[in-house]
Amino acid sequence: MQRTLTIIKPDGVKKNLIGEVISRFERQGLRIAALKKIKLSKDGAKGFYIVHRERPFYESLTDFMSEGPVVVMVIEGENAISKVRDIMGATNPADAAPGTIRRDFAENVERNIVHGSDKPESAAFEIPYFFSQIEIL
Ligand code: DAT
Ligand code: MG
């Protein structure tokens, strides 16, 4: 059993895709262990994406992530990290496989609808960034 942190990004919330995205995860046998809708501040977004601080897209990415509400979730299941990433599709929707969330809904490499932890070490940082232990059930 593995846990991963998933975010429906501001573009996904704006496009009314909360239910659609959650359904895709649930249909693949994953379980929502925690969930809330929040709005990140610019600093909150910068802290979450701190690993990307040297990347040229860091400022633009963190502006986008703080432009409107997001839904943050802890998703649980066998191989949840790679399962969620398979359902999401590649970072750039142009490279994402047919039937993935990003291929079906994302506008471009930045506005790409969803986030999912990329490895257990990332999940271990990202889950407590948003949730305390008593909120994960
Ligand atoms: P992922 O979200 O697939 O794990 P990542 O960790 O490499 O991708 O990058 C984090 C986010 O940063 C990504 O979802 C969108 C944005 N991003 C990545 N590469 C980018 C690029 N070349 N130009 C603009 N934004 C980019
Ligand atoms: Mg990543």
Image (tube, grey):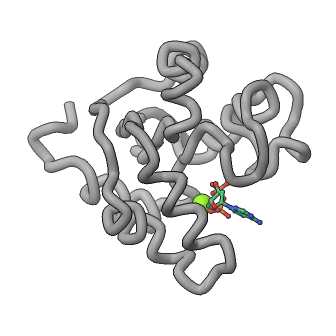
As drawn, the residue found furthest toward the bottom would be 54
Asked whether 88 or 58 is in front, the reply is 58
Q: Position of residue 16 (x, y in %)?
A: 53, 17
Residue at (42, 40) in percent of width and height: 68
Instruction: Please give the name of the residue rendered at 9% of the width and 41% of the height, measured from the top-left corner.
Output: 134
> Where 61 sits versus 105, above or below?
below
The residue that appears at 90% across and 44% down in the rendered structure is: 94
Above or below, 54 relative to 60:
below
Q: Is residue 29 visible?
A: no
- Ligand 2 sits in quadrant: bottom right
* Left or right of residue 95: residue 47: left
Quadrant in which the N terminus appears? top left
Looking at this view, is 130 or 2 the one in front? 130
The percent position of residue 117, horizontal first and vertical second, equals 51, 54
In the rendered structure, the answer to whether residue 5 lies left or right of residue 16 reads left
In the picture, which quadrant includes the C terminus? top left
* Image-quadrant location for residue 113: top right
Q: In the image, is residue 48 above or below residue 5?
A: below
* Rendering quarter of residue 126: bottom left
